[in-house]
Image: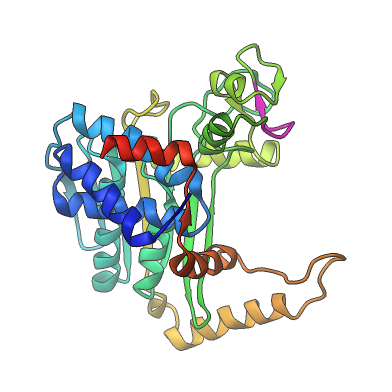
Amino acid sequence: MNVKVENLRALCQSILTDRGLDATDAHIVTDILIEAELRGRPTHGMIRLPGIAERVSQSTQSPMIVEKDAPAYSLIDGRDNLGYLVAHRCAHAAIDKAEQSGVGVVGARDTSHSGMLGYYASMVADAEQVGLVMCNTGPRIVPWGGQHPILGTNPIAAGFPAAEGQVLVDFSCAAITNGEILVALKDGKEIPAGRALGPDGKPTTDPEQARAGGALPFGEHKGYALSVMIQIFSGILLNAAPVPEMGKNYGIFMLAIDPSIFLGMDIFQSGVSEVIHAIKNSMSADGVTEILIPGERAFKERAMRIQSGVDIDNELMEELQQLA
């Protein structure tokens, strides 16, 4: 079903405010979910709304606490608030500190799933700063050489301001995300081979078995090593859970850098443009019409969907309308 963006936004906000979420907070969560849909990441979009609505209905939001604060860094106790809201506050804090001190390092603990990390990296890039975001999650990734999930999918994102828009990197350490497994389940499709193990530790293409088991790391030992690194940065370093239970005491780490502490913004953006042009003007492989820059596909799709609307699975749309 194709839905106009403004209608989807109103529906999402209504579902959240009807369950007691403050209108400002509902707007933030809605915007993050809508952006995921616009950028072609339905795994982090409306499919997450029923779970968020249930969590809002069953919990009381307590004010976050700033535990440590200095001109260039801050540590926030998320107090089990929605990860979307905690991450949004972290991004604003990191941007503010980078504006004042050149660098802003902000961490939060006791939080939960925060959605598409590229949203927060984009916030930093929109402020003409360089942003790095990472978070740990509940056990979903099987260590390379193992059989059962220990590590989180542990996504990482980076945003860079550019004259051409933004260079935006955003990926998890899993060969397949939990959201992709959820979409395969809803669509009644198999997942690609070599992405996940079942609860018996054997390879599987059944999304139900994959959900009960665990995802493999992308790039074998490389994705595994990156997941460990992010687990330490966003978990242990911030006094969040070293190996969190699903949905409990996650950590999120954000870094914002004002490029002008090293060089002028014009020089920085000129350098980014040089890299982009070198890539764009290089010879493409057979069958490839255009080499894309990280984030380019997402922003092209965003522009298209703002005009054409967002395609939402009929069954999911029915569920959302019932929630409303």
Please tell me whether residue 194 belongs to the stretch shown in magenta.
yes
Q: Position of residue 255 (x, y in %)?
A: 38, 58
Would you place residue 14 above or below residue 20 in this image?
below
Viewer-proximal residue among 102 and 216: 216
Q: Position of residue 181 (x, y in %)?
A: 56, 32
Q: Quadrant of the C terminus?
A: top left
- Please report the residue visible at 52 percent of the width from the left and 68 percent of the height from the top: 304
Would you place residue 303 above or below residue 154 in this image?
below
The scheme the figure's colours follow is rainbow
Span highlighted in magenta in the image: 191-197
Q: Position of residue 60 (x, y in %)?
A: 14, 32
Give the left or right position of residue 227, taking residue 102 as reference.
Answer: right
- Res. 106 in view: no
- Please report the residue visible at 30 percent of the width from the left and 58 percent of the height from the top: 91
- Res. 141 in view: yes
State which quadrant residue 226 falls in: top right
Q: Position of residue 239 (x, y in %)?
A: 31, 35
Give the left or right position of residue 29, taking residue 156 as reference.
Answer: left
Please tell me whether residue 260 belongs to the stretch shown in magenta.
no
Magenta stretch secondary structure, dominant: loop
- Please report the residue visible at 17 percent of the width from the left and 54 percent of the height from the top: 24
